[in-house]
Image (cartoon, rainbow, N blue to C red):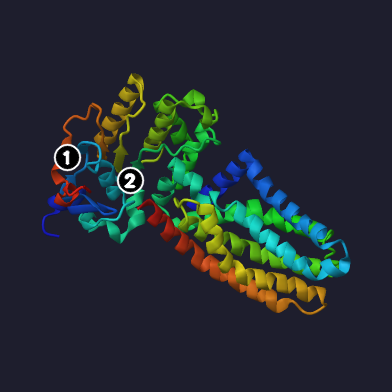
């Protein structure tokens, strides 16, 4: 490897994504180093969610290359999955399980089984008193907080968050911003798509509409 | 705790909490098998030759019933994304789901099948063959069914499609399962049928998790 500094962290070069017959974006580059944050902006349908799903490895790339510390992500999908947390539009909460059981299952799935970490994560998001309540009784905002608790319950270097603050109240938003700051202090990376104002000091902004591929313009008449 | 056992425990817990699903399969099996003495008449001479086949066909249909939900609820609530992004091989996660399906449907069917043999006039000499054949055959059905459930994920009328996909694949299990019971009834050795069923189970164990995992990745793409 020629220059180590350039290949450090999570990088994407020449990314193109196609959904069905439509090119969502093309020729997109990004670089995310330790402690850095990337905010994806753009109108609805500009491909913010698609880019996050591409970064997570859920959606196959049409063209381009994703690399972690210079090594292609495709070479070891499980290792890539192990260093990231993905939070999509869906909260992934099982209504029939309790709040604590939901969170415990997610952290077991990621190989962490520390019961202490689970309790701590619930407390961080103010869900501690609800640990034994069935998740079906949670409000939309509480469900979102439970989904956010995943980020703290099992550590991962890269957070990929799609509209993470949907339904959060002011107090939870502040707790979430503190979580982000602590994560970045420890060298963690964040890429998030949002229309809301989230305090992310020193974050880079990626405007997705400028990568919208020319093909997307020939909308069906 | 590995992803395999985490998924298994979670699915078992979900089935226990939601209770009705597991009971439904057993109730369907009992009612379907009980239809035959009414339709054909209670004469032992008429029922005895078909008893083994009837029990197997009913078990096959009963197992189909619960397969549609195998991945559907995880897909709808967002848990499937988390399962796919587990740092452990998705094949293991799939194996955990298949094991949970077998414990909640295959195992109850094995227990109830000899009891349903009574109204069908299944001779006691065939009970051992029925038990061993179902012990090997029902996990194969769960594994094949898991592939079908993954393939039809997100399709409209997925349940119908699933049955059409799975039934031809389940045919060998049906043939040798019913064959073992028929051979035992006739006082013939039924070892070779059992060996064949064991072979199918091994093949399904080796192939089904990979096929289902590939189909799940495709479903989220």
Taking the image as shown, residue B211 lies to the left or right of residue B185, namely left
Residue A119: x and y in percent read 47, 31
The residue shown at (41%, 51%) is: B84
As drawn, the label of residue A206 is: 1
Residue A163: x and y in percent read 30, 34
- Which residue appears farthest toward the left when viewing the image? A3
The residue shown at (14%, 50%) is: A214
Q: Secondary structure at mark 1?
A: strand
As drawn, the label of residue B68 is: none
Taking the image as shown, residue B24 lies to the left or right of residue B43, namely left
Q: Determine crowd level at label 1: few under 14, some 14-19, many 20+ residues with C-alpha closer than 10 A.
A: some
Write down the quadrant of residue A209 in the picture.
top left
Residue B167: x and y in percent read 58, 64
- Which residue appears farthest toward the top when viewing the image? A170
Taking the image as shown, residue A83 lies to the left or right of residue B34, namely left
B64 or A91: nearer the viewer: B64
Among numbered discs 1 and 2, the one appearing first in the sequence: 2
The residue shown at (63%, 69%) is: B173
A69 or B122: nearer the viewer: B122
As drawn, the label of residue A84 is: 2
- Which residue appears farthest toward the front when viewing the image? A221
Q: Is residue B58 above or below residue A184?
A: below
Residue B126: x and y in percent read 80, 69
Q: Is residue B95 visible?
A: no
B113 or B205: nearer the viewer: B113
Q: Is residue A217 visible?
A: yes
The chain carrying label 2 is A
């Amino acid at each position: 490897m020629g220059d180590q500094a350039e290949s450090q962290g999570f990088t994407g070069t020449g990314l193109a994504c196609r959904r069905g017959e439509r090119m969502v974006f093309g020729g997109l580059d990004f670089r995310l180093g330790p402690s850095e944050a990337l905010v994806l902006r753009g109108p609805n349908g500009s491909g913010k969610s698609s880019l996050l799903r591409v970064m997570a490895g859920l959606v196959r790339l049409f063209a381009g290359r994703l690399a972690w510390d210079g090594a292609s992500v495709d070479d070891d999908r499980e290792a890539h999955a192990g260093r990231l947390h993905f939070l999509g539009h869906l909260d992934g909460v099982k209504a029939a399980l309790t709040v604590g059981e939901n969170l415990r299952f997610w952290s077991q799935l990621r190989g962490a089984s520390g019961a202490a970490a689970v309790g701590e994560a619930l407390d961080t998001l103010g869900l501690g008193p609800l640990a034994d309540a069935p998740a079906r009784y949670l409000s939309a905002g509480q469900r979102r907080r439970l989904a956010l608790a995943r980020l703290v319950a099992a550590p991962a270097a890269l957070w990929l968050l799609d509209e993470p603050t949907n339904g959060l109240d002011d107090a939870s938003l502040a707790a979430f911003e503190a979580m982000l700051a602590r994560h970045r202090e420890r060298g963690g990376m964040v890429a998030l798509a949002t229309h809301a104002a989230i305090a992310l000091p020193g974050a880079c902004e990626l405007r997705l509409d400028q990568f919208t591929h020319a093909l997307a313009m020939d909308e069906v008449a | 705790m590995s992803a395999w056992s985490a998924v298994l425990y979670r699915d078992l817990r979900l089935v226990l909490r939601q209770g009705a699903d597991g009971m439904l399969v057993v109730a369907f099996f009992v009612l379907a098998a009980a239809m035959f003495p009414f339709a054909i008449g209670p004469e032992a001479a008429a029922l005895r030759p078909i008893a083994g086949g009837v029990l197997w066909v009913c078990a096959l249909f009963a197992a189909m019933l619960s397969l549609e939900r195998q991945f559907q609820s995880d897909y709808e609530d967002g848990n499937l994304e988390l399962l796919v992004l587990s740092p452990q091989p998705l094949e293991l996660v799939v194996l955990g789901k298949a094991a949970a399906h077998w414990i909640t449907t295959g195992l109850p069917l094995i227990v109830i099948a000899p009891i349903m043999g009574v109204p069908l006039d299944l001779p006691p000499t065939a009970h051992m063959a029925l038990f061993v054949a179902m012990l090997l055959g029902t996990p194969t059905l769960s594994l094949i069914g898991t592939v079908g459930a993954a393939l039809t994920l997100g399709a409209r009328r997925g349940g119908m499609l699933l049955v059409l996909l799975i039934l031809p694949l389940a045919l060998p299990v049906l043939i040798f399962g019913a064959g073992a019971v028929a051979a035992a009834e006739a006082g013939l050795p039924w070892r070779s049928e059992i060996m064949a069923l064991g072979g199918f189970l091994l093949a399904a164990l080796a192939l089904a998790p990979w096929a289902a995992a590939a189909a799940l990745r495709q479903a989220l793409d």
